[in-house]
Image (cartoon, rainbow, N blue to C red):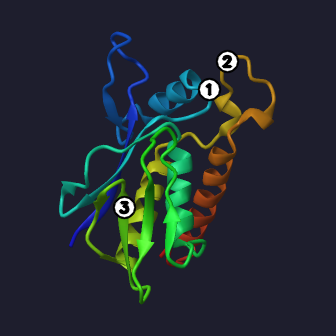
Amino acid sequence: MKVYFKTLVYNPFPKNDDDFELLDLATDRHFEIYNESYYRDAGFIRGMVDLYIDDGLFVNHIYTDNIHLTWLSYLKSVLGEMHPKKSFIAYDGEMVSTYLERDSNGENLRLIYGNHKTTWIPSNQLKQAIVKGFMEFMSHTNRDVESLKYMDQEDDDEITEEILEANEIYEKMLSDSKKGKPLY
């Protein structure tokens, strides 16, 4: 079974106000896209964090107003902060209950989105997919948060906590991987 995540952001350069094109940050313009998205949405990056199983999209695109928060909730759910049975996944903006559920012996997880459930996925495989997806997303973001002041923002306290926490986790994981430590 092949399991992976893909992150898409809303195009911050729409041709008209009704244009809702999704962009992959894995382009030459990733910093430009990220910075403009941050600026236009007052410090939040809107888009999709989608799960694929065997190259098929699970359910449909799952929208979030805060991609950093969504990735943090996935990471925390598999890096030791998960409730013994299930862990809520924050898709900020969605009104659909989304969580990871652990099986009775703790060896498998499945994503539940409303009435839709994935098959049971080995915990290590899903953890690896989450870490890889997070690292891929963060590699295309501008982590120089000082340069990300939006509108007339002057105070560092206005930078979203999710971005600061995601940056901190990413930098630690990146440092660990350069030292040869496994990420999952």
Query: Mark 1 = which residue?
Result: 42
Q: CA distance from mark 2 to mark 3?
A: 37 Å
Mark closest to the chain's N terminus, 1 or 2: 1
Which mark identifies residue 151?
A: 2
**Which image quarter holds the N terminus?**
bottom left
Q: Earlier in the sequence, mark 1 or mark 3?
A: 1
Type of the residue with mark 3: Ile
User: Residues at badges 2 and 3 in contact (C-beta under 8 Å)?
Assistant: no
Q: Which quarter of the picture shows residue 35?
A: top right
Judging from the image, what secondary structure is the residue with disc 2 in? loop
For the residues labelled 1 and 2, the Cα–Cα distance comes to 8 Å
Label 1 vs label 3, nearer the camera = 3
Q: Which percent across, then down, holds residue 143? A: 61, 43
Binning the other alpha carbons within 10 Å of mark 2 as few (below 14), some (14 to 19) or many (20 upward) gives few
Q: Are marks 1 and 2 in contact (CB under 8 Å)?
A: yes
Residue placed most toward the observer, 110 or 161: 110
Q: Quickly name the residue at label 3.
A: 112
> Left or right of 150: which side holds 108?
left
Image: 179 above or below 160 = below
